[in-house]
Amino acid sequence: MADYDPYPKLLNAAFRFVSYRPRSQKEIRDFLEKKLKKYKLYAPTVIGKIMDRLKELGYVDDTKFAAWWVEQRSLHRPKGKRLLVEELRRKGIFTQTIILDERLLAAAAAKKKLPRWKLLSPLEKKKKMYDFLGRRGFSFEVIRTVVDEVLGKIYTGEEVE
């Protein structure tokens, strides 16, 4: 058992892990460490070799990962910059600057929820929208602008896009 080389098995596991979606370096490293622990092995140099190989093949790029993450969040579960930065920090992305229009993200999130609140009074709608956007991590200034814009269009009879 002393001659066992975990490299091929871990490399295949890493390929499977990155095949589902882009991953950050930290996610891949944590995954490989977990695999080594599972097999009761200690081989930090193997993890380094695997990370180098994945970088060489273009599977590891934290900048691309951060851009992909922000895009996915803006499409499927819009969140404010504060929460996006926190999510990326947990995934090992620290120096990445996120450039996005929070107002557009907040408007998209609010418009998505509007049909649920159609029977509420204007004041209740406004409160729900403030609470919802606040929980999603948007700043107060952005929330106020978006709520006024979205609710203003509803009350003037304009089509909410």
Image: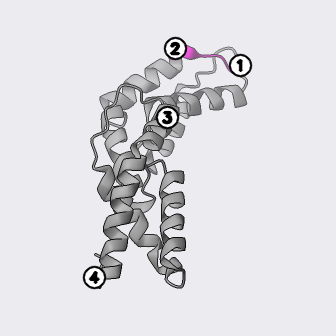
Residue type indicated by callout 2: Thr
Residue at the disc numbered 3: 91
Q: Residue at x 31, y 66 (%)?
A: 149
* Mark 4–mark 2 distance (CA, rounded to whole Å): 59 Å
Q: Position of residue 39 (x, y in %)?
A: 71, 29
Query: How far apart are labels 1 and 2 at the CA level?
Result: 18 Å
- Asked if 50 appears above or below 107 in the picture, the reply is above
Considering only order in the chain, which callout, 4 or 1, is on the residue closer to the N terminus? 1
Q: Which residue lies under the disc numbered 2?
A: 45
Let me know if residue 44 is in the magenta part: yes
Q: Which residue is mark 4?
A: 159
Residue 1 shows which numbered tag? 1
Q: Which is closer to the viewer, label 1 or label 4? A: 4
Which SS does the magenta portion mostly show? Answer: loop
Under circle 3, the secondary element is loop
Marked residue nearer the N-terminal end (3 or 4): 3
Label 4 vs label 2, nearer the camera: 4
**Residue drawn at x 31%, y 38% as measured from the top left:** 98
Foreground residue, 32 or 126? 126
Q: Which SS class for mark 1? A: loop
Describe residue 148's horizontal placement relative to residue 5 as left or right.
Answer: left
Relative side of 118 to 5, left or right: left
Q: Which residues are magenta?
A: 41-45
